[in-house]
Amino acid sequence: MNEKDPISRRDLLRSKLGLGLAQSIGYAMGQARGVRKHVEQAIREPVAPASSRPKPTASHRPPGSVDETSFAAQCTKCNACIEACPPKTLTPLDGVLGNALGTPIIDPNLGGCTMCENRPCATACAVDGVGIIDALLPIKMGHATVNRNTCRSHIGEECTLCIDVCPIENTIAHDWRKIPMIDRSTCTGCALCVNSCPVEPAAISIIPLNGRPPKPSMPDSNHPQST
């Protein structure tokens, strides 16, 4: 050992090991305190109320359907509306879990909703079901959207099939590039345009209405409204 260096290599190694061990212990204690603080904070914070949780994804329901939560929960899956549909475009929903499985949806591959004037699907639901398809509710089911990358008009081929089949005048019209444009304010989401599209898969799809109204409340017969 050098007289000018009173600390031996062994002592120096021990000091470094001790410092490293102390740092490791300090780091571990700091991590533990951080975890404990996080857990305590999580315990103190209240759980978010159910109303702030995401709403269920809407499905393409028949015209006049009540809000999605009520529809999926109350539908008896009696298929009365499916059997009453004149164009036979209603079908049970599959490929999902929970209450929505087996409930009626519009399948554009089977045609589209012709928006019958007398609403037979609503009548059937009122008689054999629970009235979650209500003739008093708006017929709007969603709105159509065009995939411009696959639309025939996008590649220069003239096509007016979706415009020709749309039951609402001026809801689908060509823009200056001859590509179909959808007026969401008047589109009902009937899906007739989807079924008419010659592209496979169709260049038009329906975005279901997310935010349908609840079933209208009936006036209490025991408390007639004053005139």
Image: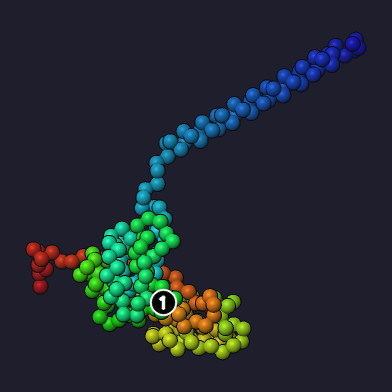
**Relative to the observer, which residue lies in front, 11 or 69?**
69
Question: What residue is rendered at 76% in x and 21% in y?
Answer: 16
Q: Is residue 162 above or below residue 214?
A: below
Q: Quadrant of the N terminus?
A: top right
* Residue 193 sits in quarter: bottom left
**Relative to the observer, which residue lies in front, 88 or 136?**
88
Residue 9 screen position, x and y as percent: 84, 16
Question: What residue is rendered at 51% in x and 32% in y?
Answer: 37
Question: Where is mark 1, residue-wise?
Answer: 110
Residue 66 screen position, x and y as percent: 30, 66
**Relative to the observer, which residue lies in front, 126 or 64?**
126
**Residue 213 shows up from this direction:** no
Q: Is residue 125 left or right of residue 201?
A: left
Q: Is residue 144 left or right of residue 151?
A: left
Label 1 is placed on what type of residue? Leu
Instruction: Count every numbered label the image shows and give the total.
Output: 1
Q: Is residue 4 left or right of residue 76?
A: right
